[in-house]
């Protein structure tokens, strides 16, 4: 995996399965956005409204800290024309800290998407960079979906979901990123 300090449209991503041997799930606490986070999100929202990424639609809301984004599966993929919703929750210190991104029910059947909507994608956790934007995260998620040739849950889906109940944050999971083929 590589990272860059300059913003870029090209996003390197690594996909994974989560094995919950060392799983720790805690509640995602929502705190007021810092001035930096608020300014950055307002800028990203304005940019999104002028030039949204293809295949995505941000649902209007009065809450800058939580975005609901509709994603449509790319043509020619197993998710072609299927519509899903992402919930993006921004932490107090965004963009220095990654947003929490989950699929709302029903989550797509994908080897890196758990039935509770949690997404196993390195840029949402260990490989996050403040240079990333909501648009770049969305494009990475669509790329992840598009690369799959099968619709199936991760092998450890039932165990993971059972151990991570009651709206707990995927950001507290110790993800093991080892599979970049799907």
Image: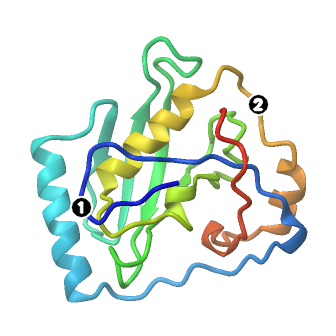
Residue at (64, 66) in percent of width and height: 170
Neighbor class of circle 1 (other Cα within 10 Å; few <14, some 14-19, many 20+) is few
Q: Which residue is labeled 1 in the image?
A: 6
Q: Which of the two residues, 54 or 32, is positioned nearer the viewer here? A: 54
112 to the left or right of 102: right
Q: Name the N-terminal-most of marks 2 and 1.
A: 1
Q: Secondary structure at mark 2?
A: loop
64 to the left or right of 42: right
Pointers 2 and 1 in contact (C-beta within 8 Å): no
Q: Which of the two residues, 179 or 71, is positioned nearer the viewer here? A: 179
Q: In the rendered image, which quarter contains the C terminus?
A: top right
Q: Secondary structure at mark 1?
A: loop
How many numbered circles are shown? 2
When the figure is inspected, residue 81 is found, relative to residue 22, above or below; the finding is above
Q: Position of residue 102 (x, y in %)?
A: 55, 55
Q: Nearer the viewer, mark 2 or mark 1?
A: 1
Q: Position of residue 56 (x, y in %)?
A: 33, 37
Q: Which residue is labeled 2 in the image?
A: 152
Q: Position of residue 172 (x, y in %)?
A: 66, 75
Residue at (43, 14) in percent of width and height: 75
Q: Position of residue 132 (x, y in %)?
A: 33, 60
Q: CA distance from mark 2 to mark 1?
A: 35 Å
Residue at (42, 77) in percent of width and height: 97
């Amino acid at each position: 995996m590589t990272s860059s300090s300059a913003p870029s449209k090209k996003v390197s991503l690594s996909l994974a399965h989560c094995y919950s041997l060392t799983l720790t799930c805690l509640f995602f606490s929502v705190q007021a956005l810092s001035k930096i986070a608020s300014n950055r999100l307002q800028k990203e929202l304005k940019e999104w409204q002028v030039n949204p990424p293809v295949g995505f639609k941000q649902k209007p809301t009065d809450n800058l800290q939580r975005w609901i984004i509709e994603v449509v599966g790319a043509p020619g993929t197993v998710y072609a024309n299927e519509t899903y919703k992402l919930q993006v929750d921004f932490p107090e210190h965004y963009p220095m800290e990654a947003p929490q991104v989950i699929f709302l029910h029903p989550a797509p059947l994908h080897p890196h998407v758990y039935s509770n909507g949690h997404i196993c994608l390195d840029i949402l956790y260990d490989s996050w960079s403040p240079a990333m934007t909501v648009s770049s995260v969305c494009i990475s998620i669509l790329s992840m979906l598009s690369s799959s040739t099968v619709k199936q849950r991760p092998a450890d889906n039932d165990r993971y979901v059972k151990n991570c109940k009651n709206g707990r944050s995927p950001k507290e999971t110790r993800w093991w990123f080892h599979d970049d083929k799907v």
